[in-house]
Amino acid sequence: MNFMWLQSFSDRISHYSESADFFIIQRYFEKIYAIHYSARSWRDRTLWYLYRALYSLIYLSYIYKTHWVLHHWQDSLSSANILGVMWFFSAVILRVAILEWHYPLMQRLQTFLNDHSYQCSHPAIVTKRAQFYRRTNRLVLAVMAINFVEIVCFTATNVMKLKDFMLQYRGAIAGGWPVQVVYGVLTMFWGGTYCMGFMVCYLLMCIFQLEIDILIQSLEDVGRSLRSGRESEAFWDNIIDRLRPHIYRLEDLSINLQHLKEVIGPIAYVQYYSTYLVIADCCFIVVSHGLSSYSIVYFISMMVFLTESFFLCHSVENLRNLKPRVASVLYDFDWMLQMQCSHDPNLSSHYRHVKRTFLLIIAQSDQPIHFSFAGIGEISMNSFAQLLEKSYSMLTFLLQFAK
């Protein structure tokens, strides 16, 4: 039975169809990492909250350890471990809370992106969506596999060697090694929720980027048919009708990108500042302890945070240029040169109407869509460059301090 289910699931994630769900894998991992689950009955809801409570107990244990450390300060390195994990888990809770709060909106965005009716009869577009579907599913599975490997490495090294990551009571280890293994695995699963939360947003941005590329490609096809000279006046007679579905698609994408900003803004805010603080903690530990089997996990975590910040800023940079890209494609139509004045009054009137329509579309499409860190600063590759610059300055300072 399980084998048949796995085979069916494998077929669904590797074969694209018009009803394909781009978020099929994400929905399973949302349940595993306690991000979201649509319970159908009170029993399901009860089990779901009990499952979430299991993660909450891990967080409460670190609140207790933080309270103990602050009142019994001894080792700065041990304190950095506990305070760093405490801040990281707090960032996880913030991210999950943001996603849960905006989940109805995200479901509407997912429904919009799963509607493949636009250009569904175009073979090249169908192929492009199919390739993206398979590639994205492989990427999500690869990220989850890497996360699983990190859980194993963390459990085999830090959990079994450092009491900072063990279950404690009054500063002493509580329970034997089976308890500590379970505690360490749940801790890393709780940490993996941060990566899964990012994947939820990143997948949305990637599919939006795909649909933007499809829109641009469709408009470029219209432009190429114009420049080929095979349709001349017949082309201009129905240019508005041919552009209408693409302009409607542009409007739909613009409206939904405005909704996407409501989710990405607070997520990016938590991402940016938690990345900076976690990197500070990781740099302090790596500088103090050097690279070893113990500190390598911190180095990997630092790289994961920086990678997430890069992908966030890079994806937003692509999305915000939707309207300027459309305006650029329309400029390439050479409509001002090809629609010369005609002595035919009817044709002249038609040309003026077409020119006016083009001017309005270009005027409305000439401004980028602005994404911000919850209203503070703009998300862009320049923001990522500033994050790298601050992180490098902090690492340099800590290296000097260590000497």
Image (cartoon, grey):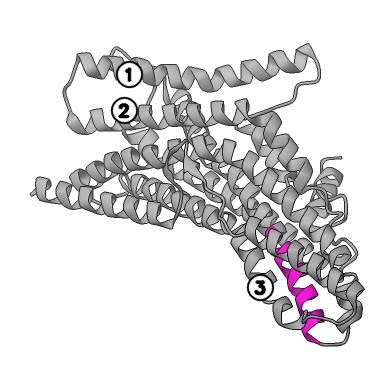
- Residue name at image x 87 percent, y 40 percent: 1
The part of the chain drawn in magenta is 212-228
Residue 141: image tag: none
Q: Amino acid at mark 3?
A: Tyr
Residue at the spot 79% in from the left edge and 69% down from the top edge: 352
Is residue 198 or residue 348 the one in the foreground?
348
> Are there few (<14), some (14-19), or many (20+) residues within 10 Å of tag 1?
many
Asked if residue 261 lies left or right of residue 48, the reply is left
Spatial CA distance of label 3 from label 1 is 62 Å
The disc, 3 or 1, on the residue closer to the chain's N-terminal end is 1
Q: Nearer the viewer, residue 207 or 84?
A: 207
Kindly tell me whether residue 131 is visible in this rendering. no
What amino acid does circle 2 point to? Ile
Q: Secondary structure at mark 3?
A: helix
Q: Is residue 348 left or right of 356 when viewed as pictured?
A: right
Q: Circle 2 sits on which residue? A: 82
Q: Is residue 363 visible?
A: yes
